[in-house]
Image (spheres, rainbow, N blue to C red):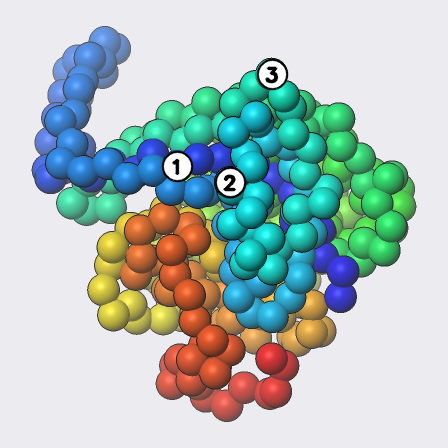
Amino acid sequence: MSIVVTGSIAFDYLMSFPGKFTEHFLPEHMNRVSLSFLVDTMDKRRGGCAPNIAYTLALLGERPRLMATAGQDFEDYRRWLEAARVDTSLVRVVPDKFTASFFCSTDVESNQIASFYTGAMANAGELSFRTIKDCRLTIISPNDPGAMLQYAEECRTLGIAYIWDPGQQCARMTGDELRDGLVGAAIVICNDYEFELIRQKTGLDEDAVAHHAGALVITRGEQGCTIREGTQQVAVPAVQPHRIVDPTGVGDAFRGGLLKGLAVRADLETCARLGSVAATYALEHLGGQSHAYTWEEFRERYEARFGALARIG
């Protein structure tokens, strides 16, 4: 199946703080916060929601097309993605800007404090699904908010099935914008915190979101995820990691596994199980694209947790 992945392309600057962020927030002084955390390590990694999702899809045997904007510093990243079997022909380079950057500190309890520099991502609205041939499925992951709404409208008009994945932009987008994106989506996906923002801003509970979209998938960390289709709800457990290294990109890996299932027309529960396995591989490594596996290794891990898997590799 021809899959187009949209979202941010970014460089991740990942830092580790040896304490707990929560011990440094003073409730009586929340009206004026001035904090600086001395970190032990910093790593620069290739990241961004869209490449992370596409990378997992490529590991699972697909040839996803990446549709996004990047800056003048993208060329080495492009070569890396192409070597990983991600099609970057739809990426537009903005020559006078740098690629978006994600600065994230993680404490010993996997709490994160992050900042995001927009860079070339601000030009994402210059791309359009109207110029793309043979797109059967896409995911609209966190990106420039205006571009995300544009893509959703184009997909509805052109009859392209899309996953609405507002992610970190739930904090930025208004209730009307979040509602505009989810109405008509094949699937709405978010984590439990993001869904609470959606609920508060739109006034839509799980039943209402599932009514406006084909399905609702809410990820819940170590609790796995829940799938809501109509009035039916299914819980899919997480896969136990061998070790926990870094949560960055775990949600993106889950989405890549989910998309793999959709590409081979698996039922949504199987899709979410594939996502759970993919997410665990990312959790065991630093950054969203440091892990690797063969289909045989992936399948073995899936079956150890969930039982027999139909041949879909």
Q: Which residue is mark 1?
A: 12
- The residue type indicated by label 3 comes to Asp
Determine the CA span between mark 2 and mark 3: 17 Å
Task: Identify the residue shown where x is 18% and y is 38%.
Answer: 41
Give the number of the mark in front: 3 or 1.
3
User: x%, y% of residue 56?
Assistant: 52, 60
Question: In the displayed structure, does residue 38 sit left or right of residue 247?
Answer: left
Q: Residues within 10 Å of mark 3 (few under 14, many from 20)?
A: few
Question: In the displayed structure, does residue 192 sit left or right of residue 40?
Answer: right
Task: Identify the residue shown where x is 50% and y is 72%.
Answer: 273
Q: Residues within 10 Å of mark 1 (few under 14, many from 20)?
A: many
Quadrant of residue 104 within the rendered picture: top left
- The residue type indicated by label 2 comes to Asp
Give the number of the mark in front: 2 or 3.
2
* Mark 1 touches mark 2? (CB < 8 Å): no
| Circle 3 SS class | loop
Q: Earlier in the sequence, mark 3 or mark 1?
A: 1
User: x%, y% of residue 247?
Assistant: 33, 50
Q: Which mark is residue 76?
A: 2
| Circle 2 SS class | helix
* Mark 2 touches mark 3? (CB < 8 Å): no
- The residue type indicated by label 1 comes to Asp
Determine the CA span between mark 3 and mark 1: 20 Å
Is residue 144 in sight in this rendering? Answer: no
Q: Earlier in the sequence, mark 2 or mark 3?
A: 2
User: x%, y% of residue 170?
Assistant: 53, 33
Q: Which mark is residue 96?
A: 3
Task: Identify the residue shown where x is 61% and y is 87%.
Answer: 311
> Considering depth in this image, is 82 or 208 the residue closer to the camera?
82
| Circle 1 SS class | strand
